[in-house]
Amino acid sequence: MIEIFNFILVNPIINILVAIYKLLLVLHIPFPLGFSIIGLTVVIRLILYPLTHSQLKASKKMQELSPHISRLKDKHKNDAKTLQAETMKLYKEFGVNPAAGCLPLIIQIPVIWGLYSVLDKVVKLNSVDLLKYVNGVVLPPLKLTSAWDTYFFGIPLGDNPAKLFSIMPFIILVPVLTAVFQFMQSKMMMASKDKTAKQTDKKVLPAGKEVKKKDDFASVFQSQSLYIFPLMIGFFSYTFPIGLSLYWNTFSVFGIIQQYQISGWGALSDLWKRRKK
């Protein structure tokens, strides 16, 4: 199974990385390995673009239907069968497939894992093991004659911020930026308050008084994960090699750009408006 995974995903990724690296060497670009990782991440993102585009569009549609589904839950809260039927009717009416956003994500996971496994090796292996590993899988024209320099603007890509912090305090910016980019992307995937102002989760009582509904589990989980997940990614970035953070941050920035194309700044714009006040 591992051999099949390597043949289908890992080996092609290594070939693309080395091809970009050799091109940068010919162009005399400094720190070619670091820029090769960035280039490889962009190439992978472009390959996955149709899938992620489909996933983000499906997610946006589901987000737009969320207020309608909430009203159905209120209306049929004591009748699960009717609620299910009405929900499926709503999906059909708006042309939404609830599973449409899952399939592209499932397909992306092996690709992302393959990219991760490649980068974990190329920035951590010593010179002898690196040449043996890379030259064992790349095409003949791409074989390396010497190990590459693993430094990127003076920072060793194979070391992690936890190890480097005592001699390079500024390296803490790497996990901080990783967490910030992840937060931005997650926040942009949520609808802004302006778009949901007319569809609040309040009930109006006959006397004119308002009471807020209790948040359901999904809403509470989404709200908490918005902050917990970026902090987790930031912590992992603090303990993982810099080369992996370089890949992850490039991946996130590309994702932010693609998310902006689909739905704009989303709920991230609410933070800016709050700051201006």
Image (cartoon, rainbow, N blue to C red):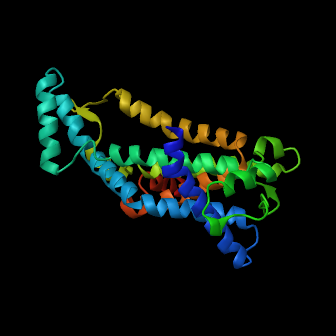
Q: Position of residue 79 (x, y in %)?
A: 13, 22
Q: Residue at x 34, y 26 (%)?
A: 214
User: Which residue ends up furthest to the bottom in the rendered image?
Assistant: 27
Q: Position of residue 231 (x, y in %)?
A: 61, 39
> Can residue 214 be seen in the rendering of this structure?
yes
Q: Residue at x 34, y 28 (%)?
A: 216
Q: Quadrant of residue 11?
A: bottom right
Q: Residue at x 51, y 56 (%)?
A: 272
Q: Position of residue 170 (x, y in %)?
A: 80, 52
Q: Is residue 13 left or right of residue 25?
A: left
Q: Quadrant of residue 200?
A: top left
User: Which residue ends up furthest to the right in the rendered image?
Assistant: 167
Question: Total marks drawn?
Answer: 0
* In-front residue for pair 33/250: 33
Q: Is residue 122 above or below residue 46?
A: above
Q: Residue at x 65, y 39 (%)?
A: 236
Q: Is residue 147 left or right of residue 8?
A: right
Q: Is residue 114 left or right of residue 36?
A: left
Q: Is residue 260 left or right of residue 28?
A: left
* In-front residue for pair 77/61: 61
Q: Position of residue 180 (x, y in %)?
A: 60, 50
Q: Is residue 21 above or below residue 225?
A: below
> Can residue 183 be seen in the rendering of this structure?
no
* In-front residue for pair 12/258: 12
